[in-house]
Image (cartoon, grey):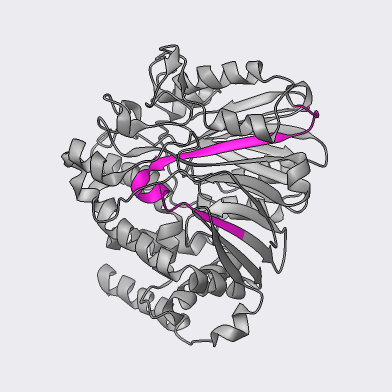
Amino acid sequence: MKLSTALLALALLFCLAISCKTPPADRMAKATRTEKNGWIYVHLEGSPADIGYQHGYLLSKEIDTLLHIMKSYLPVTSKKDWNFYRNAALTILWPKLEPEYQTEIKGIALGLQAKGMAYDSLDVTALNAYIELSSYYVPSVLNKIKADSANNRAPGNCSAFIANGKYTKDGKIVMGHNNWTDYIIGERWNVIADIIPEKGNHILMDCLPGFIHSGDDFLITKNGMLITETTITQFKGFDTTKTPECMRARKAAQYSNSIDDVIKIMTTDNNGGYANDWLIGDTKTNEVAKLELGLKSYRVWRSKDTAIIGSNFASDPKLIAEETTFKVDDKTTSPNARKLRMGQLMEQYKGKLDENTAKIIEGDRYDALQNKEASNRCVISGHVDEDMKGCPEWDEPPYFPMGAVQSKVTTTALAGKMQFWAHMGHPDGQDFLAAPFFKLHPQYKYQSNYLRDMKAYPWTLFEAGK
């Protein structure tokens, strides 16, 4: 049997496996959806199949739009079409997913089908792993064809910190994060998922529609775990025989009861996809940690009295030398410029960090290189779309529509009530308006079918169950 025929046959089996339709009322009794200030809050509860179905059913319109974007956008940015991603989902991702998460993904596809949409488990799996596939797997494939042909320019996303001890107002944990990504995708990174699974931790997280994990990674759990991350810029490496990052991230959220648990789950059978600096807090012990996770190696820092920052830079010299092409001494890069500014802010607000000062930090627009307010790649609330240099280290050309698209903040006290603050749109409060942008930069007109206005909404407090 030819490979293409075999793949088609397996894909049909996936479709048949989820083709029977369950009446929505049987699975939707505990599920809810509300909208507020640019966010979509969904409550999902029950078995993996039920949680998946609820997710697909409640967010069907948003998932459908996102998949249409992926099908048109990824061929431009990665030079690979959606069939490539579906095949990767079938051959290297699906076999490594644990049954619980296979079932949840099947449920999402079934929920979509119940709304009349012809998607299957491969579409949902590829969507969940689009970052690790497009930015890690694709470069590894290209480099096998021609060495160094892809440059391994893994993207940088996010500005974050986690602090405790003498750095915070009450000595307990404060965590903040803003998400940097392409606006065409990031302006839709607007789901707050409140998940009560049949087994494991109650989770409150932000995510993209269709994701079983957070993706930009900001979450709290009922048992006191806080997790966020920032990406390691220009990371190289991917192992197709290991477990996808999207599943390990969800598993760490759902089944960790300690920092050690998070480290163990994330490092076990690690495929190197979406290599990050993970910032982790445990409100039960008031300890915070950073797990810098590559493919070949990892390193952990932990303390009960520190402020740990993240802005897409790696810290371990061995990992930097062996697994990245990042220039640590180039002060003009976005990661290094934001590292400088984040360090300044940690000292400025030392002893004062709380939910309010965390919001100020994540919305900061001060360029520490130019010593002035700015809208560019070098500020924490980034605006690459206003930067004449773009962001070369991420292979983003001048004025590319990318930057900080939303932000979240929590504390030990808030997490104890399953609460966090969330801000949709630039956390500095500026709006992105599509029409004037395209007029100034017509080279990005190819995004006009889906790139829309991204308004900055007010900070909004979300609480699980409400």
Picture layout, residue 318 above or below residue 47: above
| Residue at 76% from the left image edge and 40% from the top image edge | 412
Q: In which quarter of the image is residue 42?
A: bottom right
User: Please, is residue 65 above or below residue 355 in the view?
Assistant: below
Q: Nearer the viewer, residue 34 or 150?
A: 34
Q: Which quadrant holds the N terminus? A: bottom left
Q: In this orientation, which residue lies closer to the viewer: 11 or 79?
A: 79
Q: In x, y percent, where is residue 57? A: 50, 74
Along the horizontal axis of the image, is 161 left or right of 148? right
* x then y, percent, for residue 438: 21, 42
Res 443 seen here: yes
**Residue in view at x 47 percent, y 43 percent:** 274
- Residue 298 visible in image: no
* Span highlighted in magenta in the image: 169-193
Percent from the top left, x then y, of residue 447?
Answer: 24, 49
Asked whether, in this view, residue 69 is left or right of residue 211, the answer is left
